[in-house]
Image (cartoon, helix red, strand yellow):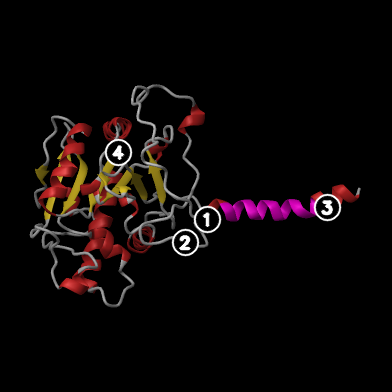
Amino acid sequence: MRLCGVLLAILPSLALLSGVCATLPIPIPDQEALVTDPSHVGERTPRKLQQPSFFRQYIGWEYENYPLPPDYQLPAEWVFARFMYRAVWTPRGRLGNWTIDYPRSDRHLSAAVRRLTRIDARSAEQPVAAEDNDDIYNWPWLYGVEVGHWDLTDLQVAKLRDFLERGGFFMCDDFHGTWEWETFVRSMKRVLPGRPIVEIPNSDPIFHTVYDLDDRYQVPGEQVLYTNSRWEKDGYEARWRGIYDDKGRLIVAICHNMDLGDSWEHADNPRYPEQYSALGFRIGVNYIVYAMTH
């Protein structure tokens, strides 16, 4: 009886500890050890493998233990899904570029979606890995940051292509200049070979779903506070580009030579100019609503 009583006493504590441990930030996966075989992508899978992955936090580039919102576990109809990708090799190894601005940026945009639309948005983001069974198909709006530094594996290429062909929407942001553009295109052409990257015309519905965004301007990163320049590297002009499917639906929205992620991340930074966050949120809201209605 005494042993039984002890067990009954500690079980609630173990459950609480388990919940706490599940939210502690963990290191990002070893990018040299990722599964790369794409041969099973697109095959019929059992329902167990189709379930959404559990929530987890990773140690990010800038934030190691960012506080979780109290309602982070509540389900919602839209979630900020952040694409986890393999980065280019550097003398320091493959860096965690996909975690730039994470998770502060994601949570600020999620809060803005709650405030500015009727979409039921979850307060916390979801990191999405192509290697996690069929998890990617549960998140119809997918965001990639610093894609000028990605070097997709064969599996990531095949899974992202399949995601887009099934009706998913991919938005990428925060890469600048010629070198980063060429690095991005190298992998993007493998994802959607034969589909051209084009300039998105001002008349496209994506610029008019909630806000009319005819008067767009370059949105800089936090570096504007130190350099007084909106551009980085040789990315002097903001470019609004995309890839369309056969029905004329935009499936990839490419924000080149701008840093919308920083405009969300630093929306509560009194030094960062409000005009950039204001436009950044409007762009994000339009892209999300477009993705969910087209």
Labels 1 & 3 near each other (Cβ < 8 A): no
Q: What amino acid type is highlighted by mark number 2?
A: Asn
Q: What amino acid type is highlighted by mark number 4?
A: Gly
Q: Is residue 39 above or below residue 246?
A: above
Disc 4 from disc 3: Cα separation: 51 Å
Disc 1 from disc 2: Cα separation: 7 Å
Disc 4 from disc 1: Cα separation: 30 Å
Task: Identify the residue under disc 2.
Answer: 65
Disc 1 from disc 3: Cα separation: 27 Å
Residue density around tag 2, few if under 14, some if 14–19, many if 20 or more, within 10 Å: some
Q: What kind of secondary structure does the magenta stretch mostly adopt?
A: helix
Where is residue 50? Give x, y as percent.
Answer: 46, 32
Q: Residue at x 40, y 61 (%)?
A: 63
Task: Identify the residue under disc 4.
Answer: 168
Q: Is residue 45 left or right of residue 195?
A: right
Among numbered discs 4 and 3, the one appearing first in the sequence = 3
Disc 4 from disc 2: Cα separation: 30 Å
Labels 1 & 2 near each other (Cβ < 8 A): yes
Q: What amino acid type is highlighted by mark number 3?
A: Val
Q: Nearer the viewer, residue 112 or 105?
A: 105
Among numbered discs 4 and 1, the one appearing first in the sequence = 1
Look at the numbered disc 4 and give the secondary structure of its residue: loop
Where is residue 164? Give x, y as percent.
Answer: 27, 35
Among numbered discs 2 and 3, the one appearing first in the sequence = 3
Q: Is residue 274 above or below residue 164?
A: below
Q: What amino acid type is highlighted by mark number 1?
A: Leu
